[in-house]
Image (cartoon, rainbow, N blue to C red):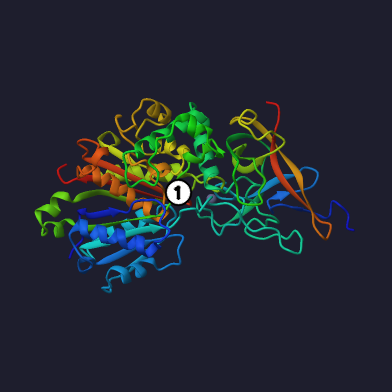
């Protein structure tokens, strides 16, 4: 068995694990537009230089939906949301909160949290992320 | 031929929307074309270009349809632009006429979608050997749909409506359900709608929740259908019969836009900016404003979408969509009727047909052929569709008497 920390893999490449899990984006060095995937040129200004930047791990829920009916194999209900992380919009599930409109609202303060997606045959553990409510 | 300043719809037809277990897309598309040609009082011999749209089929729908209705060797453009495919086909035919390459063009959109279920979402599951291995643009080790938000259309558009509520206030589950109540009520007068039963607010809110706040009747209805239109230049129209000229509908604006960059557009599709841009262009081209419109058919793929498009199409002041709806304006007896056909929620949404079918609806009223749902005295109308990704098509139409 490899050791636990070394064998963790993030759900997506733009999730950085470690002591302080956070998201990263490719930022256009010319205009500051941020992208979670690779771009040949900036979609906003067409410049071609990017640098990796950390995304704030706290934010405000700008919109959400509670998905009750999804493709086969996807557990429902879950809360899908767009979170404004200090100016960068992030798409994520809201976690550690009941998936009903009494417990979820726009304007909620949330923070990034991670969770296990399970261990594969090589002992590697996949780590997902979501945002959970924090006190205002 | 030279470039044409004027574009007219000479003939237009939509099939009844619904379930056609014994018809394929070629049958349905051909029915729409035959209807449009008959309505225009022309034949395939008069048509200089065919633009055809079909998303879910095997491809090459235009050529398949020629074989069904008449092969004349004209250029065929098979177009694909999500839910704006029909409007894109029409736009393509219009561009050819406008450029002076042909003086008459045909556009058709057709879809078989009955029983299609949920659109969007899913994705590849973990590989069989049970090892987390990154793939795709985000290096994902597992499907992201459901883990990093939702890809489903009802969920995406729910968030679009909820975002409007967060920005301007005044929205609620009940408000969105009331929008759906309006469209289901409107559809009772439309014999070509897939569904034409009125639904009470209680029925709508009590139905199966798909993606809060959209319950099932608040989602566009998957169904089969087709629509087609013949467009003609102003110069050619003058050579046709007085009856053809009288029934022709002027296309005073034909606009197609895509997304300009916006901060959050990689996270949640921005259906607002490109619709507003298209509307601005359309009003400018047509020389009219929202206050001049007698009816609007807009892309209510979900109840939550209809609300934001009141604002995007500038039917109300910015931020005023909730007040606009609550004033009763978009009901058929209101100040500016919206989706008197029943809209996508009740008339149905056979994707590629939608962008021509909504123009058919407006034409019916402008020709004073709207039957029991005629909006009296309608002279100017607007048809809007949006395909996620995104593409927005807007056409402004005027009666020949206008
Ligand atoms: Zn840039």
Q: Position of residue B33 (x, y in %)?
A: 28, 61
Q: Which of B226 and A10 is in front in this view?
A: B226
Q: Is residue A136 above or below residue A119?
A: above
Q: Is residue B262 above or below residue B43?
A: above
How crowded pointer 1 is (Cα within 10 Å; few <14, some 14-19, many 20+) is rated as: few
Q: Position of residue B379 (x, y in %)?
A: 21, 40
Q: What element carries label 1?
A: loop
Indicate left or right for B232 with B335 as reference.
left
Most distant residue in the front direction: B22
Residue ID at (18%, 51%): B248
Q: Where is residue B339 in the image (x, y as percent from the top left)?
A: 35, 39
Q: In this view, does B218 lie above or below B75?
A: above
Residue ID at (12%, 52%): B243
Image quarter where the N terminus of chain B lies is bottom left
Indicate left or right for A112 with B288 as reference.
right
Residue topped by disc 1: B260
Image quarter where the C terminus of chain B lies is top left
Q: Mark 1 lies on which chain?
A: B
On whether ligand 1 comes within 8 Å of the CB at mark 1, the answer is no
Indicate left or right for A12 with B166 as reference.
right
The answer to whether residue B264 is visible is no
* Count of numbered circles in the view: 1
Residue ID at (37%, 65%): B26
Q: Which of A126 and B357 is in front in this view?
A: B357
The answer to whether residue A73 is visible is yes
Q: Where is residue B351 in the image (x, y as percent from the top left)?
A: 42, 53
């Amino acid at each position: 068995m490899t050791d636990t920390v070394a064998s963790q893999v993030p759900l997506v490449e733009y999730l950085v694990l470690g002591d302080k899990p956070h998201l990263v984006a490719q930022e256009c060095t010319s205009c500051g537009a941020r992208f979670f995937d690779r771009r040949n040129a900036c979609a906003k200004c067409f410049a071609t230089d990017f640098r990796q930047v950390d995304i704030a791990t706290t934010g405000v829920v700008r919109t959400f939906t509670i998905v009750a009916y999804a493709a086969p194999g996807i557990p429902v209900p879950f809360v899908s949301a767009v979170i404004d992380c200090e100016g960068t919009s992030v798409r994520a599930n809201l976690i550690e909160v009941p998936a009903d409109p009494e417990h979820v609202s726009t304007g909620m303060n949330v923070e990034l949290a991670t969770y296990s997606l399970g261990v594969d045959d090589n002992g590697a553990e996949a780590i997902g992320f979501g945002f959970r409510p924090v006190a205002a | 031929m030279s470039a044409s300043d004027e574009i007219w719809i000479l003939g237009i037809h939509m099939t009844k929307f619904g379930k056609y277990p014994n018809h394929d897309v070629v049958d349905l598309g051909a029915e729409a074309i035959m209807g449009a040609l008959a309505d225009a009082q022309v034949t395939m011999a008069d048509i200089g270009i065919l633009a055809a749209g079909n998303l879910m089929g095997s491809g090459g729908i235009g050529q398949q349809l020629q074989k069904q209705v008449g092969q004349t060797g004209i250029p065929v453009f098979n177009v694909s632009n999500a839910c704006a495919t029909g409007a894109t086909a029409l736009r393509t035919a219009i561009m050819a006429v406008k450029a002076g390459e042909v003086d008459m063009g045909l556009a058709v959109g057709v879809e078989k979608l009955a029983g299609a279920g949920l659109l969007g979402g899913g994705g590849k599951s973990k590989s069989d050997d049970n090892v987390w291995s990154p793939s795709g643009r985000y290096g994902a080790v597992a499907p992201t749909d459901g883990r990093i938000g939702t890809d489903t259309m009802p969920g995406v558009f729910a968030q679009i409506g909820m975002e409007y509520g967060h920005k301007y206030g005044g929205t609620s589950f009940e408000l969105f359900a009331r929008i759906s109540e309006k469209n289901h009520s409107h559809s009772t007068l439309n014999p070509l709608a897939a569904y034409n039963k009125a639904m009470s607010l209680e029925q709508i809110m009590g139905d199966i929740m798909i993606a809060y706040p959209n319950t099932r009747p608040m989602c566009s209805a998957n169904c089969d259908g087709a629509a087609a239109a013949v467009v003609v230049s102003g110069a050619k129209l003058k050579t046709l019969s007085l009856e053809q000229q009288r029934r022709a509908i002027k296309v005073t604006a034909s606009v197609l836009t895509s997304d300009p960059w916006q901060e959050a557009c990689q996270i949640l599709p921005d259906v607002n900016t490109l619709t507003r841009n298209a509307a601005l262009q359309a009003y400018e081209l047509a020389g009219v404003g929202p206050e001049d419109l007698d009816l609007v058919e807009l892309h209510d793929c979900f109840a939550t979408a209809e609300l934001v498009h009141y604002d995007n199409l500038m039917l109300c002041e910015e931020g005023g969509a909730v007040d606009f709806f609550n004033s009763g304006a978009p009901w058929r007896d209101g100040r500016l009727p919206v989706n008197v056909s029943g809209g996508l929620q009740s008339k149905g949404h056979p994707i590629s047909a939608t962008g021509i079918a909504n123009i058919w609806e407006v034409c019916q009223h402008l020709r004073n052929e709207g039957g029991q749902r005629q909006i009296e005295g309608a002279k100017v109308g607007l048809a809007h569709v949006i395909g996620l990704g995104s593409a927005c098509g807007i056409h402004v139409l005027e009666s020949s008497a206008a």
